[in-house]
Image (cartoon, helix red, strand yellow):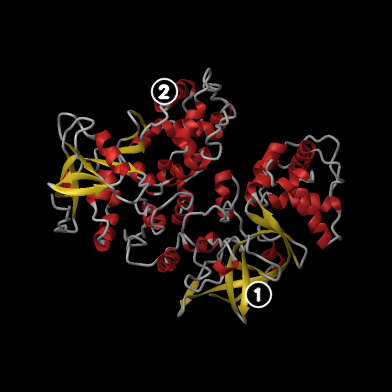
Amino acid sequence: MPLFQYLPLTSHDTIRILLLEPGFSNDPIKCTTREVTLTSAAGQYEAVSYAWGEQVPTINITCDQQELFVTAIVESLLRRFRFEEKSRSIWLDSICINQKDKAEKSHQVKRMGDVFRDAKRVLCWLGNDNESIAEKCFSLVSRAMQRLKEEWQEGWGLDNLTSDVKLTGLENNKDWDKVGRLLDLTWFKRVWVVQESGLARECNLYWGRYEIPLYKVLEVVCWLKFSKYAPILKEANTAVAPVLTVFTNIMCTYCNKPTWRDMTLSAKVVEEVLPLKRKRYVDLLFSARSLQATDQRDIVYSSLGSPLAYYEDGKPMVDPDYNEPLSSLQSKTAIALLRNPREAPYVLLFVTHDSKADVEDDDVPSWAPRWKTFGKSSACPIPLTKNHEYHQMPYRASGCSATFEYLILPGGILTVMGWRFDILNWTSSRLKPAHLRSNIDKWDPHFRDSKTPPIEHESLRLLQHDSSWRPGEILELLSFTLAGGRPESRDHVDDFSAYCKSVRDKVGTRRISPFPLPSSSKGDAQVAERAMRRAGDRRLALTAQRRMALVPLVAEAGDICCIVQGMNIPLVLREISTGMYRCIGELYCSGVMEGELLEQHGSEAPPWEQIRLR
């Protein structure tokens, strides 16, 4: 039998559909391809979403009477979705797109949103149920969904989901950890599945022999994330929040009808937490960085199904091109975002560098965000732009009135108008997210062994650098700064004191605290802990003018604090020659974020100057 050869598509308006021939479990897999227009095929096929996994095709099937080698995951899903007595029309990217033809792949990726939007339904293959837990897992999810419907009342919102929905009788079910195993499956971590499932009319998850609608799983995940009655899942206590945030953050921007998304009870909660009117394409790209991609260019391309990925005239901001190097795509995407007035003032705020070498990499301008999957050691701070997710007012360092204007010069140099208002003169160690939490088992061993809370360790280093700070003064400013200037309570000093006292008691320290802590506090330690999430994966810093700040991990003493005209969050810059800088990333700085510097100038024009960024 000859090896399978693709016939070129005859038109840009066509796709391939796979006709999967009937068969029983162990029968050889046979299929045929046919070229159709997407318009004529709409609603006549089912699209398959899956995690690619192993890339080497080692299992042979028969396709168009030729021998085609596929991966183990593709063979398993073809067997699962094959009918016994009739053929089934499906769309499967690894077969329906010639993956070796980059021109075809680039064009077909443009159509991916339409392919999944027009499918009769989307079949999401999670893999084989090797541990035989899918049945009990899906049963619990279905019962939890039914109980949620019974307890939910019309008009309820996030506060009710947090405090009033108990799922009575299911809170302590022993099978919740199986739900954790579900959320830890590779499918939930793959970047393409968000668009593939989000654009579906109907969407079901398949795990071995069992299936369940996706909306039921996401609804229960919403409860697990927000309800105070929800159990902590052993397998996914760090997966629940990312699954909910990433899926809803992108999915809620889709506007296709009909859709399974209309069946969710928590749609109001999602809109309350992630309001669509404040969404931007940069937010979607940032969310996509938490997911995995075989090709890092897909962190950008996988979001093209969202309306936010287009200019007002309907043209996409970025066209897929798999011949383009990743470094070139990063630059091109940044420029495309700058050309969109909705996106432009926020582009530079999503710059995060993992190292000094990353800052100095001339292949990609320092001012262009690196849209790629976060690595294990990558800085992954919560963007300061996300105030609206916590029902907080946006920052307004530049006064909210000036328009962001820029000019791109030859050599990829970006010119903006800026105000250099301060200089960093001290930075702390990395504020690891685990070190800002009260679970001391997650701290680095040396903090537990020395019985020193990490936040006190950094405070002592600060005082060693500048001993002029009064203990009470540093306590108030520190609690405010670690919350990014947006504490969740007016009593934030009491809350922070309660947190500090709590972790001191847990670790058993007898060291003198660097600031005064009351013997008893009315504060809420958990409120302070939640507020400090904004400080994770940043450094605490002091400036030459005695301001306290949160800065990127690669920031260092001598870096410049700068307000850019038209941007309401300042930047950290590093001067490399007279008037030429590299962009280090966004900056929270006390006494600046509410427009205080502009107010101090009154009617006088601020000292704006041309800033060139390489």
Residue in front for this viewpoint, 115 or 211:
211
Q: Is residue 265 left or right of residue 562?
A: left
Q: Mark number for residue 139?
A: 2
Residue identifier under label 1: 607
What's the amino acid at mark 1?
Pro
Does 174 sit above or below residue 320?
Answer: above
State the residue in front, 405 or 200. Answer: 200
Mark number, residue 213: none
Residue at the far top: name it. Answer: 169
Residue 175 position, x and y percent, is 49, 24
**Along the line of sight, which residue is nearer the eye, 563 or 22?**
22
**Which image quadrant is residue 315 in?**
bottom left
N-terminal-most mark, 2 or 1? 2
Residue 544 as seen in the image, left or right of residue 472: left
Using the rendered image of the protein, determine whether residue 258 is visible from the camera's viewpoint.
Answer: no
Q: Amino acid at mark 2?
A: Ser
Q: Are marks 2 and 1 in contact (CB under 8 Å)?
A: no
On the image, the x and y values in percent for residue 472 come to: 84, 50
